[in-house]
Image: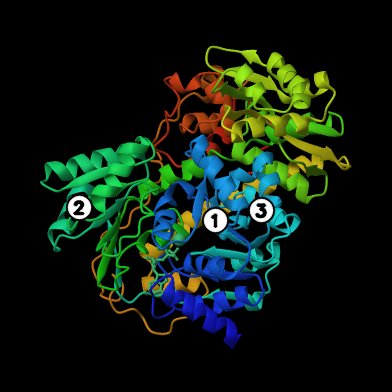
Amino acid sequence: MSDTSEVAREILKDRFGFDQFKPGQEDVIGHLLSGHSAAAVFPTGGGKSLCYQLPALALPGLTVVVSPLIALMKDQVDALGALGIGAVRLDSSLDKDAYRDAMEGIRRGRISLVYVAPERFNNERFREFIQAQKIALFAVDEAHCISEWGHNFRPDYLKLAQFAKTAGAERVFALTATATPDVLDEMCRLFAIDPECAVRTGFYRANLSLHVRATHPSSRDVALLDELNSHPPGPTIIYVTVQKSAERVAEFLRQSGRDAKAYHAGMSAEERAATQEWFFPCQAGIVVATIAFGMGIDKSDIRYVHHYNLAKSFEGLSQEIGRAGRDGKPSRCVTFYCPEDLVTLENFVLGDTPTLAAVRSFLDDIFSQGDQLELALHSLSAAHDIRILVLRTLLVYLELEGLIEGGTPIYTSYRFIPQVSSTEILSAYENDRRPFLSELFKLSKKGRTWFTLDAANAASALGVDRLAVVRALDELAERGFFELEAKSVKHRFTVLRRPQDQGALGQALFSRLCQREERDIQRLEDVVQLLQSDQCIVNALAEYFGERRTQPCGHCSVCLQEDRGQFRFCDVDPDFEWPDFRAIALIAPQVLATPRSLARFLCGINSPAISKARLKKNDSFGLLAALPFDQVLAQVGKAKGGLDDVKIAK
Ligand code: ADP
Ligand code: MG
């Protein structure tokens, strides 16, 4: 251990130019260098990246970094490049030359770190390539996503743990800024990390002061301006829930003489990059953003992080406010609370839960086929009215139940643009290879710009294995003869056994999705509780993340006994006149057959079937969008008038 720590210190100084480790770094790096897998829960800005970057230099072999924020990893890769460290980001933004160079660099060991998005592991060409390398370290950022009970479960992550094992990664490093004690346990279990090698550092940051103002939608702008006016200007982020608000609030602030820009997923990549670049050196600029902003930026002097709209969980709140004051100087965070926000946020959660009937028809579909399944998620989603992410979750559930087993997805068809003439391509190959390639070209269909090729059909026509076709295409692309893209993907599963009681399974899966929904709704309500409670806000947050603090922070709204304003509820007026549910259900009797689907429609919550039937344009879509979903659902459920449907669980 002392040897490894000496090596680590040397690299820290010589290669990164830092004199000291930040809290937790040395422990994590020590575990990794001595051959163990490890986990880290450090707050945002805590220096998690160094924990894999440093070992990447010390260990022989490749370090693979999986991050869902791959698009924002450019800065890291550039910074490593400037330090003379070979790092590359493999994503769809790379052109073919850059991609080829990257592969070549990895093969020759010039590259020590490769950054990829989790989805990349669905690409069988990539899997094959990366599996063939010696993986010294497999680092997974945002690793809390592996936990089904965490705030951001991503089914892909369960597959990552599997991949690390099958690819023979020598050690795994799971890192995150936010994990409750339960979620950390689950991370360790699923990635096979000894809990002794899980390092958690303190969450508390004395320089952040947390405040709450209860407001009304009509007076919130004024409250915000008031807040901004009563403090010296400084770099500011204001979080909102929806894109429209980002635009509107930014405009309002500009009209009030502030330098403000919007930032959200509806803007083009260039516009967003321009906003980030504008903000980075800014001394007084304001960015009004949906949650996507700030993930990848390393700006240490952000003085204010305000929540114009409610954060959707403790995890979200602590990550977002964690972007303030990384330089350690005093920074202020204010939440402007309106109960109306809760309705909007709940609607996001509620849109994910399918009806019981939908889950059942999905199961019928899956288990009425043969043992080898090839599923196209888009058509499944439309056929059963289940969102794609939820379908993938259901498939993972079935895998965890041991009913089905996932295989490598197949890219059923490829498309390509030849970069030179076919004669020229063929002349670059040996004689015995030419007939195969020439046949392959003949089997490709020419469109306006692209040629398409169905790999399976081509393979059977040529009497070879499908992988032989895929490899040939791959090689053509690598040699620069083709610009190649996978066109459509089918997810492969083998049915291991069929459920004994499919009805009960459907009910169980549905309940599980309802539980997730309840938990997510509970998370929202926890935030509201926190804002209203009489406990020190900082301590309540810390406790949730497993840190016990005995002293109150002394400078939050509660500790300072500030006037937090009037907290309201958002209940339906008892005299409210409910619409004629039966008449509305008749707009589309097939789609709006169950109370849940009708309530969704009335609350303006989209679903694959609603889109498909073009119901979003209907006047009644979103008719009750301002009302809490559970109250609408309860009312629809109570309505007499022969809504003939499946019994609902909620
Ligand atoms: P996280 O991913 O945990 O949010 P980062 O890895 O992005 O944090 O690190 C935040 C900042 O801290 C970066 O600018 C990084 O260069 C810097 N940093 C990391 N380790 C050290 C260290 N030992 N000494 C000084 N600065 C460090
Ligand atoms: Mg990070």
Q: Amino acid at mark 3?
A: Leu
Residue 198 higher or lower than 509, as above or below: below
Q: Where is residue 520? Give x, y as percent.
A: 53, 52
- How far apart are the two marked residues, 1 and 2, measured between alpha carbons? 38 Å
Please count the marks in the image. 3
What secondary structure is marked by label 3? helix
Q: Residues within 10 Å of mark 3 (few under 14, many from 20)?
A: many
Q: Residue furthest left?
A: 257
Q: Amino acid at mark 2?
A: Gly
Q: Which residue is mark 1?
A: 111
In this picture, residue 174 sits left or right of residue 523:
right
Residue 15 higher or lower than 342, as above or below: below
Toward which corner of the image does residue 27 lie, by quadrant?
bottom right
Q: Nearer the viewer, mark 3 or mark 1?
A: 1
Q: Which residue is mark 3?
A: 160
Q: Could you say which disc has been placed on residue 285 in the image?
A: 2
